[in-house]
Image (spheres, rainbow, N blue to C red):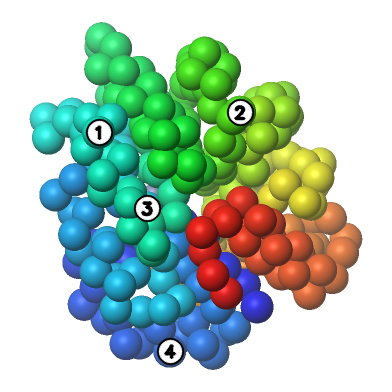
Amino acid sequence: MLVDSHCHLNFPELAAQLPAIRQAMIDNQVGHALCVSVTLSDFPQVLALAENYPNFYASVGVHPDYEDIEEPTLDGLVTLANHSKIIAIGETGLDYFRLTGDLEWQRERFRTHIKAAIASNKPLIIHTRNAAEDTIRIMREENAKSIGGVMHCFTESLEVALHAIELGFYISFSGIVTFKNAFAIKDVAKQVPLNKILIETDSPYLAPMPYRGKTNQPSYVKHVAEEIAKLRDVSYDEVAAATTENFFNLFKYAKH
Ligand SMILES: [Zn+2]
Ligand SMILES: [Zn+2]
């Protein structure tokens, strides 16, 4: 069994073909998927997925790439997170690649999410791009260690991964690890302890090889697991079992 620890099944290109996507999950033994919220306005659709299907879970949060939208508050996030199928806060974090200029609002929003995760006792889903130093610094300043979480779609260095692990975080690899020229990420996936690794698709984006460039979906997480097994020279079953166990260890409100 595998778990897709990060997907966006409410996005129109996936929502429109949900029955086929769910069948493909069964065919590829992908037992569960975590549907991740990116804005407050899309949250009801994300929650509906988790409410309608026992093997889907949901998170609540506002992605750092969205600037001119309803800003989440600490109380608002805690209130929305108070639901048995909401198992995480995010995705949140910092993205200095997609947006530039004065991004103090991103850092403030990130701090609000960390406070909300601690207050609701649910782990964080952190997105970081071109902003590793500030991300780790804010995680330390806000005591993210007290709640933990996952660094999703990890593309940073081994050093950053080890700092995050020290703060109680897991490292999640996406389809990027299967790309031929992704040498640095392949090396990180080789070296991070297996009991700290999660796998994800981040679908509809970032489809792994051999589907690179196509619409991604949770069943393709199998190719991420295969690549990690190959890189570490261990069996596929070992990677599948470890990443699934890691998922349920981290997201303690998720039931098998
Ligand atoms: Zn992300
Ligand atoms: Zn995402």
In this figure, which residue is indicated by the disc labeled 4? Answer: 23
Q: Residues within 10 Å of mark 1 (few under 14, many from 20)?
A: few
Q: Amino acid at mark 1?
A: Asp
- Mark found first going from the N terminus, 1 or 2: 1
- Given residues 73 and 17, the one toward you in this image is 73
- Mark found first going from the N terminus, 2 or 4: 4
Helix or strand or loop: what does disc 1 sit on? helix
Number of the label disc, if any, that sits on residue 145: 2
Q: In which quadrant is the C terminus drawn?
A: bottom right
In this figure, which residue is indicated by the disc labeled 1? Answer: 75
> In which quarter of the view is residue 90 placed?
top left
Q: Amino acid at mark 3?
A: Ser
Helix or strand or loop: what does disc 2 sit on? helix
- Given residues 47 and 156, the one toward you in this image is 47
Task: Give me the residue at 61% from left, 51% from top.
Answer: 250
Number of the label disc, if any, that sits on residue 246: none
